[in-house]
Image: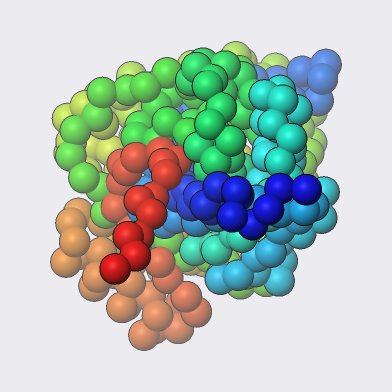
Amino acid sequence: MTSALELPPAVTARAPAKVNLELGVGPRRDDGYHDLATVYQAVGLHDDVTAAPADEWGCTVTGRDAGSVPTDEGNLALVAARLLAERSGARQPVHLSIHKQIPVAGGMAGGSADAAAALVACQELWSVAMERDELDRLAAEVGSDVPFLLHGGTAVGSGRGELVTPVLAQGTYHWVFVPVPGEGLSTPEVYAAFDARHEGRRVSEPTPGAEVMSAVRSGDPSALAAALSNDLQPDAVALQPRIGEIIGAALEFGALAAIVSGSGPTVAALASGQEAAIDLAVSLTASGAAEDVLRATGPVHGAQVLPTPRLT
């Protein structure tokens, strides 16, 4: 057994949440997934994952919605770490300590962020020499959003979202996120509702819209607001009507636009700037329209190792 003195120090990595500026959904594939054309933006709500050498695999979760996150083999961060160990030949089990800021089951890819952070932390801990494209392929096996959260920034996602192409984007965008209280929406549930709504109708193959691409290149929040779209929004609202009420309230209180984040139920409201975002957040909570709000800006970097504090 390795002695405590020989164990490498723990490594902490941080990964962001995402919002889909555009989410185009194609027909259901034979494997059960849907082809997507999405434009991702990473935003400044983060989860931190610390990987520490341990005698056996395990994880603990603290922070926002911690009680709703599995700590067994269903935890995506643990799945990612085990997969990296298998592919790299690393023999040292780790314990993952996850601290959450991203809402759980909110359409902001919190579980995928944890997986991305775990990959980066364990790669550093085990000194795994793996090219980024190889790590991307491994990440895609864990979940569709994981490769983007390794990259961050703004990017087009295709396939089922796992094929990521960076986009040149300008400006900083100010978001107010409203987690909808109650049970989160499961992604399969929302896609099933999408399929039911389109039963008997032809669903076109999705492509990224010229409007949203032009908007992110311009850095103009008003242009981006006009281009935001989500093919899953009608289904998420039908399953949780409260989402529609929050979208309406956000627009009433000055949001340039408000949209369902991913498959929901979190509402993403775009503001014209920092002060407008603060005013919007205050209005939503003071009016009782929202119990909780989170402010963040985007785009931000993808998963990265945090500096180890120096002992003095």
At x 40% / y 80%, what residue is drawn?
285
Determine whether 123 is above or below 130 in the image.
below
* One can see residue 247 in this view: no
- Residue 125 against residue 287 in the figure, above or below: above
Q: Is residue 258 rendered to the left or right of residue 7?
A: left
Q: Position of residue 96 (x, y in %)?
A: 65, 54
Residue 281 at x, y = what percent?
33, 72
Residue 44 shows in the view: yes
User: Relative to residue 289, is residue 70 drawn left or right?
Assistant: right
Count every numbered label the image shows and give the total: 0
Color theme of the render: rainbow
User: What residue appears at the point 50 percent right and 56 percent down from the top-left corner?
Assistant: 48
Residue shown at the point (42%, 70%) measured from the top left: 293
- Residue 74, given in percent of the width and then of the height, sits at 80, 49
Residue found 71% across the figure and 71% down from its top: 67
Tell me the quarter of the image containing the C terminus: bottom left
User: Which of 163 and 122 lies nearest the eye of the viewer?
Assistant: 122
Q: Where is residue 267 in the image (x, y as percent from the top left)?
A: 48, 57
Image-quadrant location for residue 42 = top left
**Residue 39 in the image: above or below residue 66:** above
Comparing 137 with 11, the one in front is 11
